[in-house]
């Protein structure tokens, strides 16, 4: 629940008992539940009003797409994951690189060529 373990939930219950007391805790929990339901209803109404006011070409708009993480995951990472999961059409054929042309070896006491523009 919200990324909390049983120990954290138990600690929150104990703190709530200490703050509100055993007689007012049920009323506080009921009020918190009503507030949460009202907030969810207001968010759903705002989402529905937004969708109703959009032109027909934007009917599939999802407000969650405005979250930057969702946007990046949807538009950038899905393409990468698709390419990772795609099976290659066929195995590539590996070929050996061409052999270099033979170079004349320098004899004893010969000076190698020097290119002044190369440095």
Image: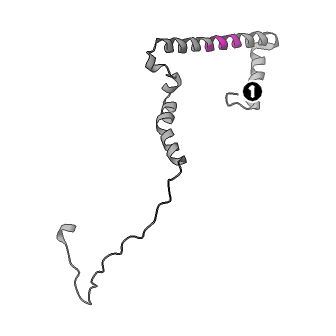
Query: Which region is colored magenta?
Result: 32-40
Residue located at (55% from left, 47% from top): 85
Task: Point out the residue furthest to the bottom here.
Answer: 108
Q: In which quarter of the image is residue 14?
A: top right
Q: Nearer the viewer, residue 108 or 52?
A: 52
Q: Which of 8 and 72 is in front in this view?
A: 72
Please state the horizontal and vertical placement of residue 68, each as a whole percent of the image: 48, 30
Q: Does the magenta stretch include residue 33?
A: yes
For label 1, the residue is 9
| Secondary structure, magenta segment, majority class | helix
Please state the horizontal and vertical placement of residue 4, each as a whole percent of the image: 70, 30
Task: Look at the image and tell me in which quarter the N terminus lies.
Answer: top right
Please state the horizontal and vertical placement of residue 41, each as a whole percent of the image: 62, 12
Residue located at (22% from left, 83% from top): 111
Residue located at (78% from left, 10% from top): 24
Task: Point out the residue furthest to the left here.
Answer: 116
Please state the horizontal and vertical placement of residue 88, each as a whole percent of the image: 51, 53
- Would residue 60 be found to the left or right of residue 27 on screen? left
Q: In this view, does 78 lie above or below 95?
A: above
């Amino acid at each position: 629940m919200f990324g909390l373990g049983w120990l954290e939930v138990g600690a929150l219950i104990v703190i709530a008992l200490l703050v509100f007391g055993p007689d007012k805790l049920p009323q506080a929990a009921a009020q918190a539940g009503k507030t949460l339901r009202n907030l969810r209803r207001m968010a759903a109404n705002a989402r529905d009003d937004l969708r109703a006011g959009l032109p027909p070409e934007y009917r599939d708009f999802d407000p969650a797409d405005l979250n930057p993480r969702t946007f990046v995951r949807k538009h950038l990472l899905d393409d990468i994951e698709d390419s990772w999961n795609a099976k290659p059409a066929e195995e590539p054929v590996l070929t050996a690189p061409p052999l270099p042309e033979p170079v004349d070896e320098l004899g004893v006491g010969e000076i190698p060529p020097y290119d002044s523009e190369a440095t």
